[in-house]
Amino acid sequence: MRRQGLCSCIIDCLNSFQGSINVHSSRHPKQNIIYGEIIIQLYPGQSGPGKAASVQLYSSSEIDLDTRIGKLSQKIYLKNGKVGKGMHNENGAKTKRYILECSVEPDFGSPGAFLIKNEDKHKFFLQSVSLRVFYDQIIHFECNSWIHPINLTKKDRIFFPNTCYLPNQTPDGLVELRKEELIRLRGDGTGERKEWDRIYDYDYYNDLGNPDKGLEYIRPILGGSQSYPYPRRLRTGNHDFRTESRPESFNIDIYAPPDERFSPKKLSELISNVIQAAMRLVIPEAKAMFKEGSSHFESFNEIAQLFTSTRDQGEEESVVKNLKQAVPDDLRKKIKQVIKKNPVKFPLPEIIAGNKFVWMDDDEFGRQMLAGINPTVIQCLQAMNQGRIFILDHHDYLMPFLSRINTEGICAYASRTLLFLRSDATLKPLAIELSLPSSLPHKEINRVFCPAINGTELMGQRPRYGNLQKLTLKTHAVIEPFIIATRRQLSVMHPIHRLLHPHFKDTIQVNALARSMVINAGGILEKMLFSGPISMELSSALYKKWRFHEQSLPEDLIKRGMATYNENRPAGVQLLFEDYPYGADGLDIWTAIENWVTEFCSYFYKDDASVSSDHEIQNWWSEIRNVGHGDKRNETWWYSLTTLRDVKQVLTTLIWNVSAFHAAVNFGQYVYASYPPNRPTSCRKFIPIEGTREFAEFLRDPDKFYLNMLPKRSEMTLSIALVEVLSRYMSDDANLGQELSPKWIDDQRIHQSYKKFAAELQEVENKIRKRNRDPKLKNRQGPAKIEYELLYPGTSNMGSQGGITGRGIPNSISI
């Protein structure tokens, strides 16, 4: 954002009110004057609140004996706001600047907070406030919050400055305000939430089903039971007995607290991305309506025609012409407008950009286990052959569900895949075991397959299970309780709140939208995944194995046998082999985060006693354990959080998961999963048994047989559309290490530490570029010639400028 520097603003302020200073000095010799600047954002159709908004300042030191909080100044109304030249922020909104002048008693001291009241009938977005006190002190308030009309909220809004205090360091005038604000945010656990409510409370996942639509839309409540344990989500209060009601269709306005909602620019960008992907889904389906027997793809070439790197105007015109008889004129006109602006075909996936059959290569299959979108499943069988045998285990968690999954045309196996580590650190598939439940109790039907010389025999047998359930659980779902607890238990003045704030951006609304359209009964996930209606039950089963401390990258690598302890290495572990792109780049990122968190926490906490005596951080951790992750409250692996070391480890793990880990498993989805044969979301046929008619068909034409195993055309195009939306970086999302707001915290030492963090990440970028150019590291590109950049920080590109780039680590789970 380009805006006028604070120093020049203060000069303008003094110049503008020089006469007023003289007048007030003569009229009120016993009063001091505090000057300020308020900046609000104006979106289309807004003019600002004008005189309908007022501000009052709280003293940080002088207490009102009646209220026991800081003395309150006179009320100052906003007036004469000006939209200056060039005052536009990164969201494309205009910024309007108001100059304040507030007379206070000589003993008022420094302002420590302010309240703002909106008596207009429209909300407005408050960006920031800066106050100049006694000619030499400047106090900053980074607000970035919607101010709703007082007739709706019934409460004034309170803001605290960018200065951080542990609870026992809070200035006297702010102690009770600090407590009151947290009580407000917790609410009382009752009532339906409205757009303007700033209330953070917990609930079960009781809004996934929709019984009103029929028995097939009933889903179990996740969370609160031994059968279906799950993290808690944000409560919205739309209760219908034990379940929350929800709209029949996708609802963009599903409740999220105002400060958790997307910016208008991001919301518009997301809607545009969804419409664009939907049209690329609808157009092929519309074309298929005019063909006989077109519910399935008949050739790889037909699948490839879904993608293009150039426009085919003739085809686009043909689609519009064919739609003439199928849709109303007004809808056809809208479709024509969308087609005119955007290509009707999906972007060409990198996995087939250079060689359209490279995905069939066994070496490429092995490389994707180390550098693809699910590089956290592979484990080393250390007891076998000196640590050179590795396994992909999709057996134990799937087997209990297969009898229910394999209905209505779904054919899924529980699988184990063995791979051999060659001397050049590439992985060679050795064998695949496919298992099905037997009709006999506690028995299985097992089949083992080995690679054929020509490499085609295993093509349809490689298990490429999607990672959407794991992605939903291990990032989105498990993080939401941490966000809720942070808002409820840590004051915005708490340094840990300030540290975590950019890493929680937009996650609550992303999760709410997912419950509305993606993971709900009959939603996208159920339509496209092999697990269908039990997809979220499967996610609950995976949560039973979740351990917070194992979400630390070093601990995860140790658990999977992919690294060993080594105190001489920066992260305390050493990889089993260096050409493990996710592990190598990830440990560099982990170390940078850990160093930054260590410097930050050590600055505010001087010793273990200062941690254990911090009642806000202790309440935060207790609520996470006992409420947010209440189904695991009795587990013994939780950190005690009574030492500085515990705090550093918890925060490093949190920041790693919401930034780097999420980037590694999310933003490569279009690269690898948008071409359905490479990562099919389900199967319609079992592997044929030798000697049967199906086996003869397979031998006669393996490609055709494999195509007949793949999902229906509609399901495949739906999965492409989804991963296109999920893989797009949003242009207003900041990447890890990018400059935050210049005044995000009023402490120069912390600013210097953050710059050091950013410089360390830039050095990681240099390392990644060097590794990707090293011909000895074959897994950095592999047969597909796709450089591993999913953990490339992208510190110099704001939000990677949006788009599908497979490069950059956003600060938060924001898509």
Image: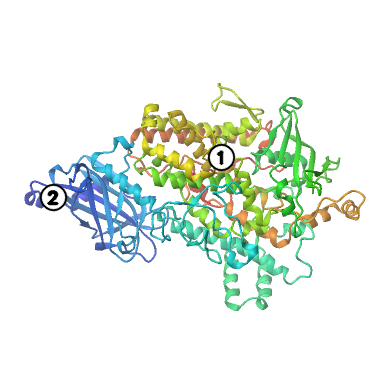
Residue position for label 2: 21
Image quadrant where residue 787 sits = top right
Q: Position of residue 359 (x, y in %)?
A: 74, 46
Residue closer to the observer: 778 or 184: 184
- Residues at badges 1 and 2 in contact (C-beta under 8 Å)? no
Residue 173 appears in the rendering: yes
- Which residue is located at x 47 percent, y 39 percent? 737
Is disc 1 placed on a helix, strand or loop? loop
Among the two numbered marks 1 and 2 on one chain, the one whose residue lies closer to the N terminus: 2
- Residue in the image at 58% along x and 53% along y: 726
Residue 544, image quadrant: top right
What residue is shown with label 1? 792
Q: Is residue 233 left or right of residue 211?
A: left
x then y, percent, for residue 262: 46, 55
Secondary element type, mark 2: helix
Q: Position of residue 683 (x, y in %)?
A: 75, 54
| Quarter of the image where one finds residue 344 | bottom right
Image vertical order of residue 552 relative to residue 197, above or below: above
Between the residue at mark 1 and the residue at mark 2, the CA separation in whole angstroms equals 53 Å
Residue 461: numbered disc: none
Residue at the top extreme, as displayed = 568
What's under tag 2, amino acid-wise? Ile
Instruction: Identify which amino acid the numbered label 1 is placed on.
Output: Tyr
Q: Position of residue 770 (x, y in %)?
A: 60, 33
Q: Residues within 10 Å of mark 1 (few under 14, many from 20)?
A: many
